[in-house]
Image: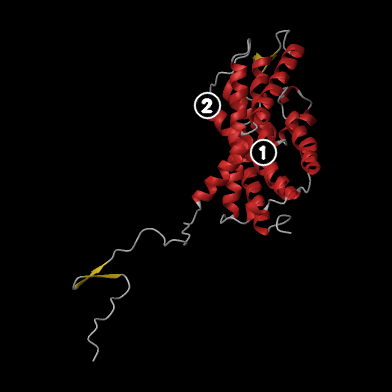
Amino acid sequence: MNDQAPNPPAGVAQTGTRPEVRSPSPFAEPGTVRISAINWGGLKALYMKEVRRFFKVQLQTIWAPAITTMLYLVIFTVALGRSGRMVLDVPFGDFLAPGLIVMAMMQNSFANSSFSLLVGKIQGTIIDYLMPPLSEMEVLVSLVIAAVTRAFLVGAAVWLAMLLWPGIHVMPQHLWAILWFGLMGAVMLAFMGVLTSIWAEKFDHAAAITNFVVAPLALLSGTFYSVDAMAPTFRALSHANPFFYVISGFRYGFIGTTDSPLLAGSLLLLGINAALGIGCYALLKSGWKLRS
């Protein structure tokens, strides 16, 4: 007969003559990864990586676009606004300034999101986006939020410069319109940038989208003129341009008047962003041009 006491069961510690039950540890065992439904840590890490990437060269990514936008303001106000020209019952400079702000925001949102995956494919570091324990949705959200962050930083820099510019009034009247349409425009261009970075195989491809799609849509969106003064054909074309609703709604937040229906524009932009987001997610999920 064996006189040795039996070993205590798992989870029970032997203390003297009476066994003590250990409470389960709230932490994972060493070497075991515990990730909830959303990898918040990984999402934040990728977001911070993208923000630090463009912030490290902020002279090029934030301040240079602000200076370029101010040059637009100076040139057009000197050329068209010195004779007391009024547009939508406000001075031409006040009409022009909000459109320039949100146009700079959208262009820089596109530039940021169209760079990340593309440079990864070109340099062979795309594995840094595919290998970590991040879902396609988490990667997409990180890239889009980083692009929106850059867009609002550029917008804030341009707005501060215009606030100090003599003869230009850019004090907000409807803050909700500024934030909503600014967000919708930045998100829309961020999704377009992600689609471009997935499709493009070299920087020339991304530059082609910038020059032949983004720039024309931005310049022909009512930034420098009111579409009400245009011929019916060109007015209809402007209303088919989603950039027009972003700029018109954003401008409403500053001058209080608009040449587009705000509710219809909001719903249209929301639908476009939903469609673009689904398209980006589907392409990331499929791995098209990323895993080959």
Residue annotated with mark 1: 112
In the rendered image, the quadrant that contains the C terminus is: bottom right
Residue annotated with mark 2: 175
Residue 157: % across, % down: 60, 24
Q: Is residue 33 above or below residue 142?
A: below
Residue 230: % across, % down: 77, 24
Q: Residue at x 61, y 43 (%)?
A: 144
Find the residue positioned furthest to the bottom. Answer: 1
Find the residue positioned furthest to the top. Answer: 83
Q: Nearer the viewer, mark 1 or mark 2?
A: 1
Residue 71: % across, % down: 72, 19
Secondary element type, mark 2: helix
> Which sits in the foreground, 142 or 22?
22
Q: Earlier in the sequence, mark 1 or mark 2?
A: 1
Q: Is residue 266 above or below residue 255?
A: below
What is the three-letter code of the residue carrying label 2?
A: Leu
Figure quadrant of residue 6: bottom left
Rendering colour mode: secondary structure
Q: Residue at x 77, y 38 (%)?
A: 213
Q: Along the horizontal axis of the image, is 287 left or right of 252?
A: right
Residue 147: % across, % down: 62, 38
User: Is residue 257 visible to the viewer in this orientation of the structure?
Assistant: no
